[in-house]
Image (cartoon, rainbow, N blue to C red):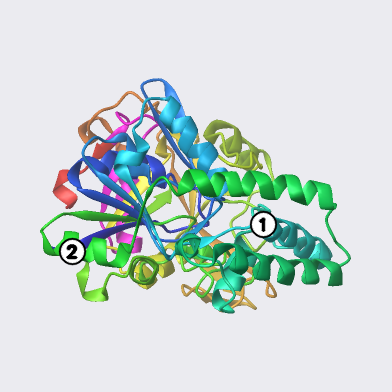
Amino acid sequence: MKVDVLLGLQWGDEGKGKVVDVLTPRYDVVARFQGGPNAGHTLEFDNKKYVLRSIPSGIFQSGQTNIIGNGVVLDPVLFSEEARALEQSGINLKDVLKISRKAHLIMPTHRLLDAALEAAKGKAKIGTTGKGIGPTYTDKVSRNGLRLGDIEHRFEEKYAEARQRHLDRLASLGAMPDPEELATLEAKWKEAIEYISQYDIIDSEHVINRMIDEGKSVLCEGAQGTLLDVDFGSYPFVTSSNTVCAGACTGLGVAPRRIGEVYGIFKAYCTRVGSGPFPTELFDETGKKIRDIGHEYGAVTGRERRCGWIDLVALRYSIMINGVTQLIMMKSDVLDSFETIKACTAYEIDGKVTRDFPFNLDDVEVKPVYTELKGWKTDMTSMRCENEFPSEFKAYLDFLEKELATPITIVSIGPDRTQTIERKDRV
């Protein structure tokens, strides 16, 4: 057996949660391999909306095992809030969710550091969500991190050492917290640690590999998007982990030879949250129209997303880096009312046209080279098979497949589970 990987190909917010939920009936296991609670996966079904921040999106399907892998950084407080809310909605979470011992913990002082470090950057700020994720990954790579498995060995001592390091750094930044406020945050955090200890805490790399050996099917779920990858994204305006397919190997302990299908998710247009370069960003009424129709606001933060036309230069790059075998296009319906659709097929930089994603997008002037296509001017939200697609939309799909040299096997035309059309002939 091989594991399949599902990840985003743009700057995140592509709609991964819905697709995982649609695909999970085919899998025995859904495993999250990187990221923290800034990644809000939104799922809508039965007239209810759920936003998952740390918990894998497979929990709504019966019979599956869900795993939070070692590559994830976990905030016990946010996790407990999310988990308790799901339990109140009738999900027996402790029966279906397992958590890696090697997952690193976000401490209260990590969040304080995140805010202080971002403020110190001034105009050069990254635009983080302030959840403490970056400082937690910094501790991880500097070998100073606190892991979930540490609750079993000298936990108070390890916590105190990490806490003091953080307070020393906060003092150097002139951002020492109020002692009473910190004490309140820590009391809540330690209560959440007690709650999380009730879950099945596992050596996830052993568990996942045994499951594969037993013939069980595994879907690896990524967070954020490829263009936010710490190595391959639009650095430094990136997240703190490897969001690409290789991150499934390091974030779960799965060997590269065991990777099977790679599902790459993208929107029919493009969005970005926070700071950083965005070549196809629209500052006019068209961009506002896309934002309003697409409800482009952060699932966790509520932040307004920047919107623009689809960027095929960036998408080709993401497909190459991840080894994508199947494409999944989300939010096609958002463009239903447009007379003309544009797609960026190349960049013009310093008078030269290139189809390659450059080393640096931030310090050069990038002019998108667009191809215009006729809009389909049809409400597609009630369609249930691709035979119903208007000819102009079919032409858009054909154009994208030719440019990207990868089949588009699933098309989403709305937020509900039922508004997901599989193109069987493309698989």
Counting from the top left corner in percent of width and height, residue 166 is at: 73, 67
Residue 409 sits above or below residue 141 on the image: above
**For the residues marked 2 and 1, what is the alpha-carbon distance in whole angstroms?**
37 Å
Tell me if 401 is positioned left or right of 129 in this view.
left
The image quarter in which residue 108 lies: bottom right
Circle 2: residue type: Arg
Q: Nearer the viewer, mark 2 or mark 1?
A: 2
Circle 1: residue type: Thr
Counting from the top left corner in percent of width and height, residue 374 is at: 43, 42
Disc 1 is placed on an element classified as loop
Q: Total marks drawn?
A: 2
Disc 2 is placed on an element classified as helix
Counting from the top left corner in percent of width and height, residue 409 is at: 25, 49
Residue at (42, 30) in percent of width and height = 87
> In this view, which residue lies farthest toward the right?
174
Is residue 413 one of those drawn in magenta? Answer: yes
Instruction: Tell me the crowding category of disc 2: few under 14, some 14 to 19, or many 20 or more residues within 10 angstroms, Cα based.
Output: few
Looking at the picture, tell me which residue is in the foreground, 161 or 31: 161
Is residue 405 one of those drawn in magenta? Answer: yes
| Image quarter of the N terminus | bottom left
- The residue tagged 1 is 128
Counting from the top left corner in percent of width and height, residue 100 is at: 38, 59
Magenta span of residues: 395-420
Looking at the picture, tell me which residue is in the foreground, 83 or 293: 83
Residue at (36, 71) in percent of width and height = 246
- The residue tagged 2 is 210
Tell me if 61 is positioned left or right of 376 in this view.
left
**Residue 188 appears in the figure:** yes
